């Protein structure tokens, strides 16, 4: 099958987990004998490539005309953002670019990951040619310009006027594609989006991202204290400040916390907690180093206060036998089973997190069976299993039938 993958971000230019998931699926499809082309963006016009082979995929890395590139979004001034989104929705050059790609690739199928940054009106070109497509919902971008329904340090209570208006435009473009389906890595993300967009009119499926993580170069060894790990963006939505407040109340216990990642809240959290003897900020590390750190840890914290979709860090941790203490929110409860491979704690509740962490620190022996259970179920997250499920959905949407559950 000739497959065009559309993902505004794609390795080696990585900012989050969605593009890593797209890359993992693309390489698996190539290994299965499919011809895979990828339409993505370039950080600058000088980084553009056209029909270059990378990792077995035909890469089309373009620099669409925008007020700023997708790589500069977090640093762009606020006054430019409305212009950027208007260009992303209505600039006719988006559609012409998609037509040009379709002329060259002649795909049998389109796998949509991130269309934002490449132009939503390009979807019309796919529809005109009656090419079947599946949209993977890595976030709430079809309903929210910020892609998360999270603003000013808290979840949005409802659909604001700008997001509601742009969501209607996005759906209008999607309706041009007759054979269309949706995949979400979590049921929570899918059901939330259904309340904001009528995507239930189309086939919708839950399927975990087919990621493959490095095997740790070390093995887990016991220690005389509990080694706690956080891996992720240092942003208020991740709720790390909740866990930090909780751990600060437990400073008389024997534990360490290693924080891997960076983000806008790093300076604040370093200033507030950096002097504590139990904390270490390790910055952003390559995936192999993260895997090694997981093997050397006893508990992963995922204290998110927003609707996390299906955090890859949870899947990676459970795959190497690292128990997870996560928020009871979003897609996290679909991965973490209390008393089996981890613990769930009320999102944003400092008291609840203090009590849960105290229980682990006072009874570290409880972690051993959780580690064993996680290891016993690691095969469920194997890339061939998950990728095979996704491809079966592709085939079903292409053929106009229902995929197996």
Image (tube, grey):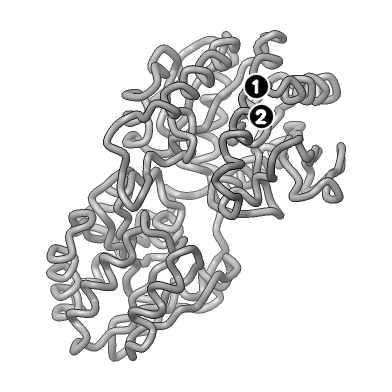
Residue positioned 30% across, 48% down in the render: 154
Q: Nearer the viewer, residue 66 or 276?
A: 66
Disc 1 crowd, CA 10 A, few/some/many (<14, 14-19, 20+)? some
The residue lying furthest to the front in this view is 79
Q: Nearer the viewer, residue 96 or 59?
A: 96
Q: Secondary structure at mark 2?
A: helix
Q: CA distance from mark 1 to mark 2?
A: 5 Å
Indicate the position of residue 5 as horizontal and vertical percent values. Answer: 68, 33
Label 1 close to label 2 by CB (< 8 Å): yes
Q: With 348 as the anchor, is 136 left or right in this view?
A: right
Q: Nearer the viewer, residue 185 or 95?
A: 95
| Quadrant occupied by the C terminus | top left
Indicate the position of residue 93 as horizontal and vertical percent values. Answer: 77, 24
Residue positioned 83% across, 46% down in the render: 45
Indicate the position of residue 196 as horizontal and vertical percent values. Answer: 36, 24
Mark 2 — residue?
A: 87
């Amino acid at each position: 099958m000739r497959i065009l993958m559309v993902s505004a971000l794609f390795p080696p230019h990585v900012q989050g987990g969605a593009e890593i998931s797209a890359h993992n699926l693309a390489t698996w499809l190539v290994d299965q004998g499919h011809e895979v082309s990828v339409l993505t963006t370039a950080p600058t016009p000088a980084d553009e490539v056209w029909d270059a082979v990378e990792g077995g995929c035909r890469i089309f890395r373009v620099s669409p005309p925008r007020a700023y590139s997708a790589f500069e979004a977090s640093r762009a001034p606020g006054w430019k953002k409305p212009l950027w989104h208007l260009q992303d929705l209505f600039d006719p050059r988006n559609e012409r670019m998609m037509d040009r790609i379709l002329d060259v690739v002649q795909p049998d199928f389109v796998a949509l990951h991130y269309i934002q940054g490449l132009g939503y009106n390009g979807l019309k070109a796919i529809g005109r040619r009656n090419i079947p497509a599946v949209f993977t919902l890595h976030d709430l971008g079809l309903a929210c310009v910020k892609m998360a329904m999270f603003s000013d340090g808290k979840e949005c209570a409802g659909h604001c006027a700008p997001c509601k208006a742009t969501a209607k435009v996005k759906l209008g473009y999607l309706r041009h594609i007759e054979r269309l389906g949706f995949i979400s890595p979590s049921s929570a993300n899918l059901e939330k989006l259904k309340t904001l967009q009528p995507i239930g009119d189309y086939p919708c499926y839950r399927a975990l991202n087919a990621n493959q993580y490095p095997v740790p170069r070390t093995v887990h060894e016991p220690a005389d204290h509990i080694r706690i790990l956080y891996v992720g963006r240092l942003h208020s939505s991740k709720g790390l400040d909740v866990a930090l407040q909780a751990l600060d109340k437990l400073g008389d216990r024997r534990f360490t916390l290693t924080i891997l990642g960076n983000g806008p809240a790093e300076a604040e959290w370093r200033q507030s907690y950096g002097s504590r003897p139990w904390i270490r900020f390790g910055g952003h590390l390559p995936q192999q180093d993260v895997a090694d750190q997981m093997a050397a840890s006893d508990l992963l914290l995922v204290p998110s206060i927003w609707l996390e979709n299906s955090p890859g860090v949870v899947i990676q941790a459970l795959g190497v036998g690292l128990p997870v203490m996560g928020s009871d929110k979003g897609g996290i409860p679909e991965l973490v089973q209390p008393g089996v491979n981890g613990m769930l704690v009320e999102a944003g509740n400092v008291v609840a997190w203090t009590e849960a962490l105290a229980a682990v620190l006072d009874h570290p022996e409880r972690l051993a069976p959780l580690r064993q259970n996680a290891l016993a179920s690691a095969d469920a997250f194997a890339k061939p299993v998950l990728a095979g499920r996704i491809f079966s959905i592709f085939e079903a949407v292409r053929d106009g039938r229902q995929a197996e559950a």
